[in-house]
Image (cartoon, rainbow, N blue to C red):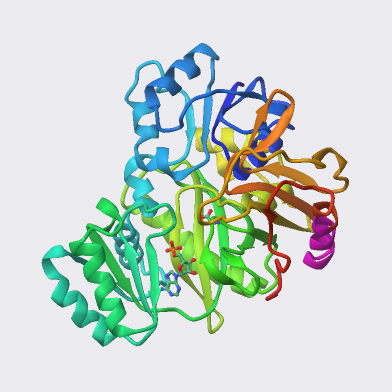
Amino acid sequence: MNVLILGSGGREHALAWKLSQSKQLGNLFIAPGNAGTAQLGLNLPVDPTHFSEIKQQVLQHRITMVVVGPEEPLVRGIHDYFLADEDLKNVVVIGPQQYAAQLEGSKEFAKEFMYRHNIPTAAYQSFTAENIPEGHAFLESLSPPYVLKADGLAAGKGVLIIEELGAAKEALTDMLANKRFGAASNKVVVEEFLDGIELSCFVLTDGQNYVSLPSAKDYKRIGAGDTGPNTGGMGAVSPVPFAEDDFMKMVEDQVVKPTIEGLQKEAIPYVGFIFFGLIKVDGLPKVIEYNCRMGDPETEVVIPRLKSDLLTLLIAAGNKTLHSQEVVFEENSACTVMLVSGGYPEAYKKGKQITGLETVTDSLVFHAGTTLKEDTVLTNGGRVIAVTSYGKDHHEALKKSYQNIEKIDFDQMNFRQDIGFDL
Ligand code: AMP
Ligand code: GLY
């Protein structure tokens, strides 16, 4: 079968790497892809949110499955677009329809869903420009720090954590009255601050059945010791040492099952990945957020640990036969370290030549933000390369990644030297 992956990051390279090992794969396409995915399939120069251009490519290349990497096409309704089109309706789309994608696309929708199904999460209220004084009163009822979230997608920047009450009130006014995050902050969710350690869990579901994928922990801050601004993710570790079996059992019983059952009770179809952003507070799991896709860079450690055939699993998700699937994982740890452009997550330059990639041994190199110019690999984003390694534990895996990073270079290359420091 011919498969198209939408997206251009390390997640998409890791998915392409795994799918290309499947005997069931015909031709692989990636739109728009990067220099790494170009080694595994054909990159198509199409924006994942330009649905009519995607349609053209799907028909031209006889593609029968589309795996949606990032959230934006899903939140904009790519799956619905396929279902509504006579020529596309039989193409399997991995990723939920627009209604369910609100689990990621609207913080308020996600919170209401969790409340309806008794899924543990932080207490909250949501506000609009019409009730800012009530928002200020709610902030006064909470203890610091204060958590303010733009309801809609805001490129990962829509969550503010503020120490001081006056500043939190000002920020709330700014988000609502001055549209600090544009339409994404027409509504703002204000919630209780949860103090704990975060991890990510993933399932692949057909809406009725699901298979659990390994847990992972990502490192979001740019600086050592989790300091400085948030990034898309600077590294990841799987499994998560503090996610012991009894904790994961609670995650399954209190979070995963109620989520899948909630979708069924509300007759919300869902074919695709669900990403549970969790926090462990006093030994108990709480949901920080849902995402309607795999994480990046979590995919670069979760997928390498999957021994089963990914395409078989995706086909089963599309056929709603996931209950018949056995999933096997690598016992070893997998860890990744992200190489980023100098300046990221603020302004950075692109187009720097990357050297040494071919000298890497005993690690997997996933391209996150690269492009090919003739035969030269150039940087093309903030996050550039993820170096993933296996080891008997995360120490051993990380050591290999750091050794291989020594061989890779580009102008102003930056990376965190302390992935896994808190484990
Ligand atoms: P989100 O986009 O909802 O994942 O939020 C971004 C980050 O903000 C999370 O990964 C957490 O580190 C932090 N965060 C979000 N909500 C809370 C909360 N209620 N308590 C503490 N930290 C939070
Ligand atoms: N690594 C977090 C995310 O993919 O949203």
Left or right of 250 on screen, residue 155? left
Predominant secondary structure, magenta span: helix
Q: Quadrant of ligand 1?
A: bottom left
Q: Is residue 22 visible?
A: no
Residue 191 percent coordinates (x, y): 33, 74
Magenta extent: 390-402
Q: Is residue 57 magenta?
A: no
Count of numbered circles on the image: 0
Q: Tell me what residue is drawn at x 48 percent, y 14 percent.
A: 59
Residue 224 percent coordinates (x, y): 65, 71
Residue 321, placed above or below residue 251: above
Front-most of residues 343 and 327: 343
Left or right of 23 on screen, residue 47? left
The answer to which image quadrant residue 374 occupies is: top right
Q: Is residue 86 visible?
A: yes
Q: Tell me what residue is drawn at x 66 percent, y 74 percent.
A: 242
Residue 209, placed above or below residue 282: above
Residue 418 percent coordinates (x, y): 72, 69
Left or right of 189 on screen, residue 318? right
Q: Is residue 397 magenta?
A: yes
Q: Tell me what residue is drawn at x 53 percent, y 24 percent.
A: 45
Left or right of 152 on screen, residue 301? right
